[in-house]
Structures are given as structure tokens and as C-alpha cells.
Image: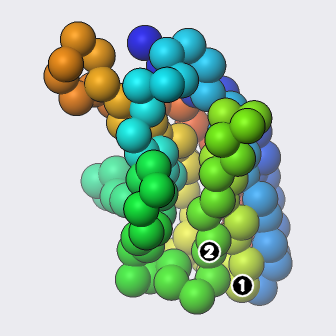
Amino acid sequence: QVQLVESGGGLVQPGGSLRLSCAASGSILSIYAMGWYRQAPGKQRELVARIPNGGSTNYADSVKGRFTISRDNARNTVALQMNSLKPEDTAVYYCNAEYYSGGLRANSWGQGTQVTVSS
């Protein structure tokens, strides 16, 4: 099992920046990718950014050039730097870890953190 704890988020004005962080614990060595998803009211959860072990990152088209995902393997953390925020970025953001459990692929989710972009 992998446990995730998020921090960051809050209220920011359009054009501002926020940084989200997520700390993983438990079966760390089984993780093969980490990422951030978001869910706005009335919408489905969507991928924001994903960073696999030793692979290239991928981003949703809507955040390319504004958001940056990074991992610190020594500290078992993943961060999402969000710049030039827009009102449409308002959502609950969830940290995600993809890992192997008993030879099968599994997912863990953080509790979610609210990001509100408003003047």
C-alpha cells in the first residue's frame, strides 16, 4: 500500500502562482509513476500532469507551459508548480501514485486539496 498526503493549495488571484506538494509513504519502491489530477464541480476527474520513473512527463494541454511537475525521489515527494493561474484552474487537486501490488497495478489517491483562482 502507498499512502499520500498533500499540502498547499488555497485561494489565489488570476495570474498568480501556487505550489502543491505530496509526500508518499508505505510501499515506496513499488511506485512506477506519480501525478496530479483535478476535479472541478460537475466535471469528471482529469489528469493534470504525470511523471513516471525515468520517463518523460506529460501534461494536459490546458496547463502546458504554465504548470511543472517534479519528483524528489530522496524525499518521496512530488510537487506541482502552478503559474499564471486562471479561474478555470479552480478545482480539487488530487495526488496520485501508480504502483505494483502483488504483481498487479494499483492506484493510491491523496485526500485532495482545494485550489481556487478568483479575484
The reply, left or right, for residue 6 in relation to residue 57 is right
Q: Earlier in the sequence, mark 1 or mark 2?
A: 2
Mark 1 vs mark 2, CA separation in Å:
8 Å
Mark 1 sits on what residue? 84
What's the amino acid at mark 1? Answer: Ser
The quarter of the rendered structure image containing the C terminus is: bottom right
Q: Going 71% across and 66% down the picture, which residue do you hit? A: 81
User: Answer yes or no: do the residues labelled 1 and 2 have beta carbons within 8 Å?
Assistant: no
Where is 15 relative to 9, above or below? Answer: below
Q: Which of the labelled discs sits on residue 11, or is there none?
A: none
- Examine the rendering and report whether any part of residue 40 can be seen: no
Where is 58 relative to 97, above or below? Answer: below
Q: Which of the labelled discs sits on residue 67, or is there none?
A: 2
Residue 76's quadrant in the figure?
top right
* Residue 99 percent across, percent down from the top left: 36, 30
- Mark 2: secondary structure: strand
How many C-alpha atoms fall within 10 Å of the one at disc 1: few (<14), some, or many (≥20)?
some
Q: Going 75% across and 35% down the picture, which residue do you hit? A: 75
